[in-house]
Image (tube, rainbow, N blue to C red):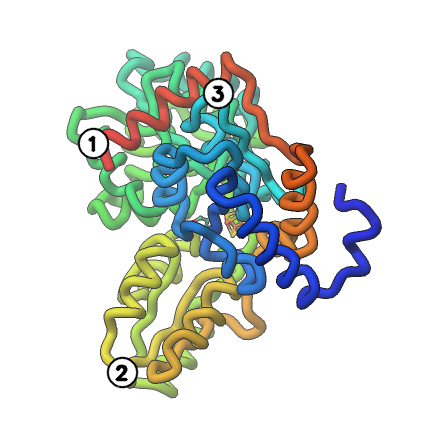
Amino acid sequence: MLPEKYKAISDEQAILKIRHLKALLGKDVFILGHHYQRDEVIQFADATGDSLGLSQEAAKINSKYIVFCGVKFMAETADIVTADNQKVILPDLAAGCPMADMANEYQIQKAWDEIAQVVADISNVVPVTYVNSAATVKAFCGENGGLTCTSSNAGKVLDWAFNQGKQVFFFPDRYLGTNTAMRLGLKDKEIVLWNREEDFGGLSPEKIKTAKIITWDGYCPVHKRFESANLDLLREKYPDLRVIVHPEVPESLAIQADEIGSTSYIIKVVSEAPDGSIFAVGTEAHLVSRLAKEYPNKRILSLNVPTCMCATMERISPQNLLWILESLAEGKVENQIIVPKNIKEKALIAINSMFELS
Ligand code: 13P
Ligand code: SF4
């Protein structure tokens, strides 16, 4: 936990000290920053990215310490893909992801056993976990012929499974699973929702057998709040509006969007659009406000007012980052994320399979 003395430090003071410490620590420390981080923090990132980009970056870094300004599943992924002598640090251990917490390995194993009782051959079902999941859930996929995916490669991963005639068991995000499957042309009846509170997901054996994708009923509380009602109002006001959303939004909104993609994709589309373009963006507030600041000649609006902020991403403050760097300068490693070896090995199989497809 952040020691008391750091709480009295202002953002401005912390920023000055971080600048100094970064120069002092040099190449020993590499800071990774997710696009949802606050401006005061992300300015110190040596690399920024979406979940896929950051995991690929982590796999390439040689630094002794990797400070992950993001949430826990991202830091765990970094620990899984880095060498044993590298240490991954999360500046606030309470920076989790509520969606990732909606599925644990016991629930997934129970559901898997139930699906196995119904389908003719469980080896024809591929378990796919969104990277927004615990390392133990990724390990389950690695152990059972499955893999991970992110918002930027979910289409490729599902396509790969469907092309082999496999069924997909997808978790934890119902919307990423459904939106991706719909974009691949699946029909409504081929996509079924697994209710984690009920035996056999509350589904009939027929539904389980005939589904092409069974999606867990988890969701991101931040993206779930985006509504299509706001979209109608904005389209009326701005006829040239382009709507771009993250695939974690509900499908009722996703089907009305002009573009859908990961945080890096959203940034790319906005940055490449001509001056004067007007966008309504359906993703986390820090990213939307950064885009608005960086592209003053374009109009960047949030699809929802008030904007939807990820409170756990927000937990990484300049004060937390300062504490971590000051400790490293004193030879102390705080908040290290350690994935146990047996979990790491299995989870790595699932992550590497995704890397191969990306
Ligand atoms: P990206 O991989 O698109 O950055 O998404 C991560 C995330 O947590 C979105 O809520
Ligand atoms: Fe998790 Fe949603 Fe926050 Fe992304 S925005 S880290 S999915 S809670």
Q: Secondary structure at mark 3?
A: loop
- Residue at mark 2: 275
Q: Quadrant of residue 141?
A: top left
Q: Is residue 75 left or right of residue 298?
A: right
Which of marks 1 and 2 precedes in the sequence?
A: 1
Q: Nearer the viewer, residue 190 or 287?
A: 287
- Residue at mark 3: 84
Q: Disc 1 marks which amino acid? A: Trp
Q: Which mark is residue 160?
A: 1
Q: Is residue 347 left or right of residue 29?
A: left
Q: Residue at x 37, y 61 (%)?
A: 245
Q: Residue at x 35, y 35 (%)?
A: 60
| Mark whose residue sits in front, 3 or 1 | 3
| Mark whose residue sits in front, 2 or 1 | 2
Which of marks 1 and 3 precedes in the sequence?
A: 3
Q: Disc 2 marks which amino acid? A: Asp
